[in-house]
Image (spheres, rainbow, N blue to C red):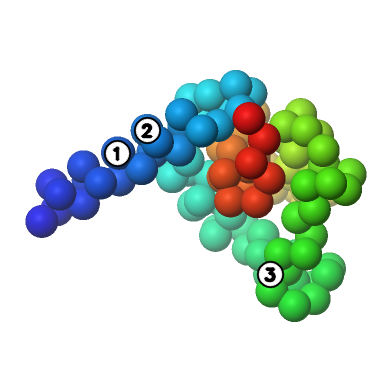
Amino acid sequence: MKTFLIAISLMWIGLAQAQQHPLFKGADLPLGEKLIAENKCNECHIRRVGGDGNSIYKPTGRINNAGALRGMVEYCNTELNLGFFPEDTNAVAAVLNLKHYKFR
C-alpha cells in the first residue's frame, strides 16, 4: 500500500510539473506545501482578507504573471522574515500557481 501511495504521489508531481509555467519548472511541490503549512500562510491571509483567505488570490489583480507571483511570495518572505531560500520561494509560488493562478 505504501508503494502504491508513493507511486501516486510521484505521478501527481509529474502531472503537476507538466502543467506548470516554465518559471516553476523543477520546483519542489511537496516542499512548497510543507512551507505553506508550517508558516501558516492561510491563517495570515484570513487575517488580511477574511473568509477562508482565498480572496487574496486574484489572478486578474496585481498578480498577473508568474514573475509577479514569485515576487509576491518573496515579499511575504522578506516582510515576515520567513528565511526562505530562493528554491523555497519558488516551491511556494509553484504550489500557489497550481492551486490558484494557473499561469502556463
The percent position of residue 74, horizontal first and vertical second, equals 76, 38
Q: Which residue is mark 2?
A: 14
Q: Amino acid at mark 1?
A: Leu
- Residue located at (29% from left, 38% from top): 10
The percent position of residue 7, horizontal first and vertical second, equals 21, 42
The percent position of residue 103, horizontal first and vertical second, equals 67, 35
Quarter holding the C terminus is: top right
- Residue located at (79% from left, 60% from top): 56
Q: Amino acid at mark 3?
A: Glu
Numbered tag placed on residue 43 in the rendering: 3
Q: Secondary structure at mark 2?
A: helix
Q: Amino acid at mark 2?
A: Gly
Choose top left, top right, bottom left or bottom right for residue 55: bottom right
- Residue located at (58% from left, 51% from top): 99
List the single residue furthest toward the bottom. Answer: 51
Q: Secondary structure at mark 1?
A: helix
Q: Is residue 85 left or right of residue 79?
A: left
